[in-house]
Amino acid sequence: MTVNLLEHDLESLAAFCERLGEKRFRAVQLFRWIHQRGCSRFEDMSDLAKSLREKLKGVAHVKAMDVITQHISADGTIKWLFDVGGGNAVETVFIPEDDRGTLCLSTQAGCAMGCRFCSTGHQGFSRNLTTGEIIAQLWFAEHFLRKHLKRDERVISNTVMMGMGEPLQNYTALIPALRMMLDDHGYGLSRRRVTVSTSGLVKKIDLLGVECPVALAVSLHAPNNALRDYLVPLNIKHPLEELMPACVNYLEHAPRDFITFEYCMLDAVNDSDAHAQELVQLVKHYGHSVSWCKFNLIPFNPFPASGLHRSKQERIQGFAKILSEAGITTTIRKTRGDDIDAACGQLAGDVVDRTRVTVRIARQRSSELNSNPLDVPTDAKI
Ligand code: SAH
Ligand code: SF4
């Protein structure tokens, strides 16, 4: 078994090279070949000594997970389903906008948090992704897109850990992956453009602030404990009295001067004027002013068996108006990639059933894909 070098951030790649009797700067060269140039073949890494290339061939490889499907939406959004083995698959979504390209990454296969309105939550937890499986989504997408869009420069300018899974529950694997995103020898993204989204693991929020501060989004969804206990069961363990101070404290380390609260708009559940007013009070209670946070209202994306409905557009606007008039910056998330089920919370909606079929197809296809991992058949439908 050879080692997949995507598992190593620069520090651990340097240690790996040292074990091979190589100097640290070799690790920098190798890291740049892999992450900046998308190179997976040691023989193509022309400024590495031939002896090192030979050595590497014997002990290491560079490979992303197999792509099961790739769907391109009419609006340019691209969704990939990756095979992570054992009948599990995870999804990654690229969202192009005028001034940026955002990649939404998964951090776990499934999720143990069981939020009511989330299809990943309904699916249950399978396993944590490794560091290599997290970064492979960016590695693959960035270099695929450069080729696909015929661009030499960087395509992905922002990453958000808002795909499948609770990133902070996979903290140990997440941190090196974040470091690779930030590393100037890797993807060179600024801390402000890397966002971790969490349902509220407070101790890990504290730790993230100290160890690897990046932009933070917190999935709030309710203005009080009773409703939040129901929608986000983690709240029973870490209620608002713990979560809100953790968010305020995070600002001491955060690269931005605000926290983003995500709020999924559920018809007749959490979307009344009274809920909005209660949110304003909540925000005021924990901050000196209201400017320490922003709200991002996400129209609920329905999936079978949720038993929930999306708030009407006028209701969402009425809710946003109350927050805005209280001075809280509030945006309503545009739904992207609707036609390919790439919107928030729709990820792997029916993955358990789909995975059986898709993994079979992936196996048939893997020989083609693996011969050139960046050459994926476009819009493969299952
Ligand atoms: N587990 C993390 C990150 C992944 S979910 C978290 O919960 O923050 C990313 C965002 O999508 C979260 O804000 C989540 O609440 C939201 N979301 C989940 N299911 C949704 C759905 N069906 N419709 C709209 N938003 C949803
Ligand atoms: Fe997990 Fe986030 Fe979905 Fe909750 S919303 S179940 S934390 S992925």
Image (tube, rainbow, N blue to C red):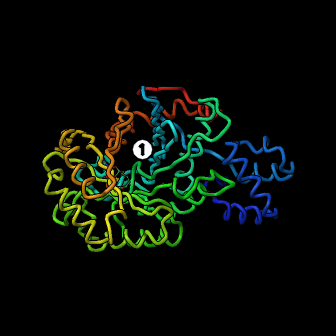
Q: Which residue appears at 22% of the width and 59% of the height?
A: 222
Q: Amino acid at mark 1?
A: Gly
Choose between 215 and 294: the one closer to the eye.
294
Q: Which residue appears at 34% of the width and 38% of the height?
A: 335
Residue 361 in percent (x, y) is at 46, 31
Tell me if residue 106 comes above or below residue 339 in the rendering.
below
Q: Secondary structure at mark 1?
A: loop
Relative to 322, 89 lies left or right: right
Tell me if residue 47 comes above or below residue 291 in the rendering.
above
Residue 338 in percent (x, y) is at 34, 33
Q: Residue 360: which quarter of the image?
A: top left
Residue bearing the label numbered 1: 87
Q: Which residue appears at 54% of the width and 58% of the height?
A: 191
Choose between 305 and 266: the one closer to the eye.
266
- Residue 1 appearing in the image: no
Tell me if residue 373 comes above or below residue 265 in the rendering.
above
